[in-house]
């Protein structure tokens, strides 16, 4: 059995939908390694023929047929790509056709339809949320915290920034994040700017060993990265969150998607 397979994501747009769906499916196969190849903006017959040649070349190089996830609206272009020697998983034919039959309506078959969302309030809200999260990253601004929908707190390098950006980019949630530092533990209080917004706070913690590994990548051999300091900070942060009645979770073994989903669920936030 081939343990390394090449996967193509072919689309007439960016290919984000095909890659997101395909990656979720392939994550179920732990024993197989996948090499990703993106072929976006395949919106003409010439580009379709070029894609077919590239897929064939990869099949010959691998000695195994590639896997193709595609979102191609134009039937003629899709038919050309389907001539390639590969396992084809066409998201439109798999999902759109059955929905047309069930709903009794034809789909728009518009190329790049998903990305027309740039004209909607939802898209503008996401841009605003991203700007807000960037401006309020790592406690760098205390302005307009009343507009924050959630304030993530935790020790340095516990996952606050990537979670903030994911929530803002994917869901349009305005997120601020504040680090808990030794001075906060000495005072026994939350950072002053966020005390009035405790109900919006959600805590992130992490296993001290994992934290030490992460910090050593940034500042090797420092006290900041020492296991003793990491244990002390994590313990103090968890005690503070428990004392303040702030809900929290450990990011040690969780993906950004899992963390974000938990935050949304616990705080009952709506995008």
Image: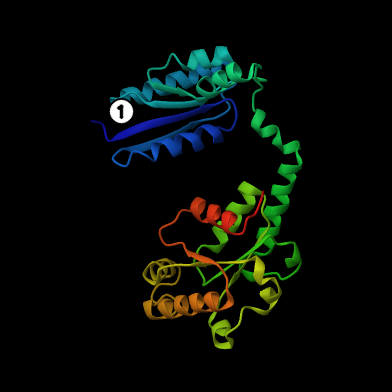
Residue closer to the observer: 118 or 149 = 149
* Left or right of 237 on screen, residue 134: right
Residue 64 location (% of width, % of height) = 30, 25
Q: Residues within 10 Å of mark 1 (few under 14, many from 20)?
A: some
Identify whether 58 is placed above or below 17. above
Query: On the rendered image, what quadrant is the N terminus found in?
Result: top left
Q: Toward which corner of the image does residue 244 lie, by quadrant? A: bottom right
Name which residue lies at 45% across and 68% down.
218
* Left or right of 12 on screen, residue 38: left
Identify whether 42 is placed above or below 229. above
**Which residue is the extreme one toward the bottom?**
186
Mark 1 element type: helix
Identify whether 243 is placed above or below 246. below
Residue 253 location (% of width, % of height) = 40, 58
Residue closer to the observer: 147 or 241 = 241
Residue 169 location (% of width, % of height) = 63, 49
Residue 131 location (% of width, % of height) = 70, 55
* Left or right of 37 on screen, residue 97: right
Name which residue lies at 43% across and 81% down.
232
Residue assigned mark 1: 62
Name which residue lies at 49% across and 52% down.
258
Q: Is residue 149 visible?
A: yes
Q: Is residue 222 visible?
A: no
Identify whether 130 is placed above or below 107. below
Q: Toward which corner of the image does residue 68 lie, by quadrant? A: top left
């Amino acid at each position: 059995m081939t343990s390394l397979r090449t996967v193509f994501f072919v689309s007439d747009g960016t290919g984000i939908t095909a890659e997101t769906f395909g990656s979720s499916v392939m994550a179920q196969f732990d024993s197989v390694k996948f090499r990703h190849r993106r072929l976006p903006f395949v919106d003409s017959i010439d580009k379709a023929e070029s894609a077919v040649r590239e897929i064939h070349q990869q099949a010959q190089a691998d000695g195994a047929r590639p896997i193709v996830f595609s979102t191609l609206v134009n039937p003629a272009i899709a038919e050309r790509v389907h001539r390639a020697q590969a396992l084809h998983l066409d998201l439109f034919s798999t999902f759109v056709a059955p929905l047309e039959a069930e709903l009794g309506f034809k789909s728009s078959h518009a190329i790049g339809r998903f990305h027309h969302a740039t004209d909607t309030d939802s898209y503008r809200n996401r841009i605003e949320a991203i700007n807000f999260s960037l401006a309020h990253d790592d406690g760098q601004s205390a302005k307009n915290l009343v507009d924050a929908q959630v304030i993530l707190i935790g020790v340095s390098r516990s996952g606050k920034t990537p979670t903030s950006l994911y929530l803002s980019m994917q869901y349009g949630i305005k997120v601020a994040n504040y680090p808990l530092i030794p001075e906060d533990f000495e005072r026994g209080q939350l950072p002053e700017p966020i005390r009035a917004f405790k109900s919006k706070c959600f805590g992130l913690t992490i296993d001290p060993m994992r934290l030490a590994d992460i910090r050593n990548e940034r500042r090797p051999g420092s006290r900041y990265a020492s296991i003793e300091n990491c244990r002390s900070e994590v313990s103090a942060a968890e005690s503070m969150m428990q004392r303040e009645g702030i809900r929290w979770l450990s990011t040690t073994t969780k993906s950004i998607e899992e963390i974000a989903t938990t935050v949304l669920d616990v705080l009952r936030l709506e995008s």
